[in-house]
């Protein structure tokens, strides 16, 4: 069936309803379809716009904070004794290509050296007194 472009909306709806057996309300006014996307928004609703560069930075910061929060909880459960700063630096190093196993080895070795220095420093004070 050809559609006659000269027919109004009411007439086209009436013809279509006959084809698919839908009742049509009589005397529908002819209207133009509004193609303005903002007219579709509900009252009080704002059009979502692409986030600005500042908003993207804020979202990335918040996501990074959440990741560090989760990792800190895991680190506490595993008794790593890493501070939040140390954990953040470790994550940053790993993200930049440092081998995680090598990093763990270095951290363990630094802890041993630090503990040894504390013991020597502490013993030095006790022996001098």
Image: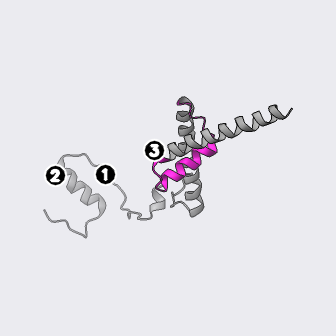
Give the quarter of the figure containing the C terminus: top right
Residue 93 pos. (x, y %): 52, 52
- Is residue 42 something one can see in this rendering? no
Q: From the viewer's perspective, is 78 left or right of 27?
A: right
- Residue sitting nearer the eye, 10 or 120: 120
- Can residue 74 be seen by looking at this rendering? yes
Where residue 14 is drawn, which disc sits there? none
Rendered image quadrant of residue 110: top right
117 to the left or right of 111: right
Secondary structure beneath disc 1? loop
Alpha carbon of mark 3 to alpha carbon of mark 2: how far? 72 Å
Front residue (pair 116, 4): 116
Q: Which residues are magenta?
A: 78-102
Q: Which residue is denoted by mark 3 in the rendering?
A: 101
Q: Nearer the viewer, residue 110 or 21?
A: 110
Q: Position of residue 24 (x, y in %)?
A: 27, 49
Return the residue nearer the eye: 46 or 23.
46
The earlier-in-sequence mark between 1 and 3 is 1
Residue that extends furthest to the front in the rendered view of this protein: 127
Q: Nearer the viewer, mark 1 or mark 3?
A: 3
Residue for badge 1: 26
Determine the residue positioned at 18% across, 49% down.
20
Tally the marks.
3
Q: CA distance from mark 1 to mark 2?
A: 17 Å
Residue drawn at x 46%, y 55% is 97
Image coordinates of residue 13 in percent, x first then y, are 26, 56
Disc nearest the viewer among 3 and 2: 3
Q: Residue 19, which numbered label?
A: 2
Crowd around label 2: few <14 · some 14–19 · many ≥20 (10 Å): few
The Cα atoms of the two marked residues, 1 and 3, are separated by: 77 Å
């Amino acid at each position: 069936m050809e559609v006659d472009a000269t027919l109004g909306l009411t007439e086209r709806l009436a013809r279509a309803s006959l084809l698919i057996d839908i009742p049509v309300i009589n005397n529908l006014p002819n209207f133009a379809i509004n193609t303005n996307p903002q007219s579709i928004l509900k009252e009080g609703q704002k059009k979502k716009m692409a986030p600005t560069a500042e908003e993207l930075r804020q979202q990335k910061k918040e996501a990074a904070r959440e990741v560090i929060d989760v990792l800190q909880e895991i680190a506490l459960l595993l008794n790593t004794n890493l501070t939040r700063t140390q954990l953040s630096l470790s994550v940053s190093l790993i993200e930049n290509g440092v081998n995680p196993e090598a990093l763990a080895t270095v951290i363990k070795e630094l802890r041993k050296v630090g503990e040894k220095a504390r013991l020597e420093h502490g013993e030095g004070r006790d022996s001098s007194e």
